[in-house]
Image: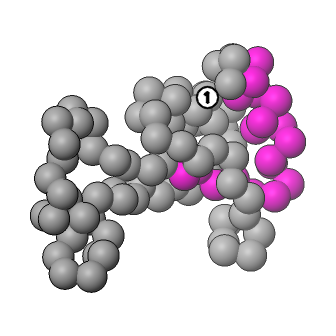
Amino acid sequence: MIHFFNRETLYCGGSMKTFVQIRNILENHHIPYRYTVRNRMTQWAGRGTMRGRMGSAGQMNPQEEYEIFVHKKDREKAAYLVKREAGN
């Protein structure tokens, strides 16, 4: 089981395509993982949210950050598989 103290970040970035690709690789190889998705435009910055104060400025993609965690013992294998299969 993956907990806060035994996990390492495998991926942290803004590409949903890469996020999904890495998750598929991990699932295909039966490597357990956890993930978080944070929308940086909803963070409070004084009065209201950043998006409420500034708008989306014509951006089609929300400013989301994806992070995938794996168990420390699986980190090396997972990184190798992602590099081999996704080219990341």
Q: Residue furthest bottom?
A: 46
Residue in the picture at 19% in, 81% down: 47
User: In this rendering, does residue 75 appear at all?
Assistant: yes
User: What is the x, y in percent for residue 12?
Assistant: 59, 48
Q: Dot 1 lies on which element?
A: helix
Q: Position of residue 15 (x, y in %)?
A: 46, 34
Assign the magenta stretch its main secondary structure: helix
Is 43 drawn above or below residue 36 in the view shown?
Answer: below
7 over 22 or under it: above or below: below
Residue 44, picture quadrant: bottom left
Q: Left or right? Give the position of 59 relative to 79.
A: left
Residue at the spot x=33%, y=57% of the render?
39
Q: Looking at the rendering, in which quadrant would you find the N terminus?
A: bottom right
Amino acid type assigned to the residue bearing label 1 in the image:
Ile
> What residue do we see at 21% from left, 70% from top?
49
Question: Residue 52: horizontal and vertical position, in percent?
Answer: 13, 64
Residue at image coords 54%, 52%: 67
58 lies above or below 63: above
Residue beneath label 1, please?
25
Relative horizontal placement of residue 70, taking residue 40 as reference (left or right): right
Taking the magenta stretch, the answer to whether it contains residue 31 is no
In front: 78, or 53? 53
Span shown in magenta = 67-84
**x then y, percent, for residue 36:** 47, 58
On whether residue 70 falls in the magenta region, the answer is: yes
